Amino acid sequence: MELNLAVFNNFPILETERIILREIRVSDAKQILEMRSNNRVNQFIPRKPLEILEDAEALAQRTSDAFKNQLAIGWAGQRKGGTEIIGTCGFNSIDFANLRAEIGGELATDHWGKMLAFEAVDAIVDFGLNSLNLQTIEAKASPLNRGAIAILEKLGFVKEAHFKNRVYFNGVFSDMAVYTRHKS
């Protein structure tokens, strides 16, 4: 078995009932900055908030370069008929030898509670298992992030690990849970 590298020939655009998932562009930097500087979006993610537009532009460029170098796939989600992105999600890293990838993402707070994250993650997981030919998709989440965990469990992810004091960020140790979904 091996991954389907043909998916890297052209960026894979995914479409759901309400969302289009397309490549992340440097022109998305303003919306990325808004999400990544929002304390509510970042509350369960051990990362420093973005502070300036240039940092968001650099992040968008790194995401684009990672796809070109076949290291990761990052999608920007847009409501159909909309022009601005509402979130980002994708495979942050791909382990080619073991047919595994780690999924992660964020959603602008204006769109919480509308099942849009579920819709996007469902499409990306389906793509990963059936088009990219992954055997396993892994998600790392704070055990306190009930929203993310509910999405993962609804999509068939199973908790495989719970690490105590796994992450040290801003002077505090936090637990981390690992959820996985395997190809049937």
Image (cartoon, rainbow, N blue to C red):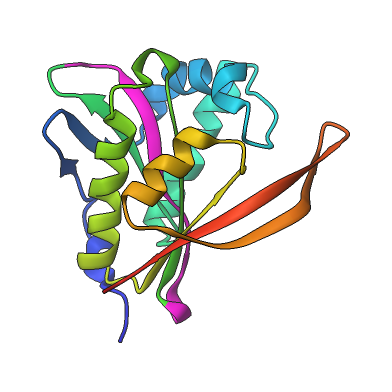
Identify which residue is drawn at 38% across, 28% down.
87
Identify which residue is drawn at 30% across, 55% down.
125
Where in the figure is residue 177, as x and y percent of width and height? 61, 53
Decide if residue 182 is on the left or right side of residue 102.
left
The magenta stretch spans residue 169: no
The quadrant in which residue 86 appears is: top left
The quadrant in which residue 31 appears is: top left
Identify which residue is drawn at 33% across, 48% down.
154
Q: Identify whether 10 is placed above or below 39.
A: below
Where in the figure is residue 48, as x and y percent of width and height? 70, 29
The quadrant in which residue 117 appears is: top left
The magenta stretch spans residue 92: yes
Residue sitting at the far right? 171
Q: How many marks?
A: 0
Q: Identify whether 13 is placed above or below 36.
A: below
**Magenta highlight range:** 82-98
**Front residue (pair 97, 64):** 97
Report the magenta stretch's main SS.
Answer: strand
**Front residue (pair 64, 119):** 119
Q: What is the quadrant of the C terminus in the image? A: bottom left
Residue 105 appears in the figure: no
Where in the figure is residue 92, as x and y percent of width and height? 48, 52
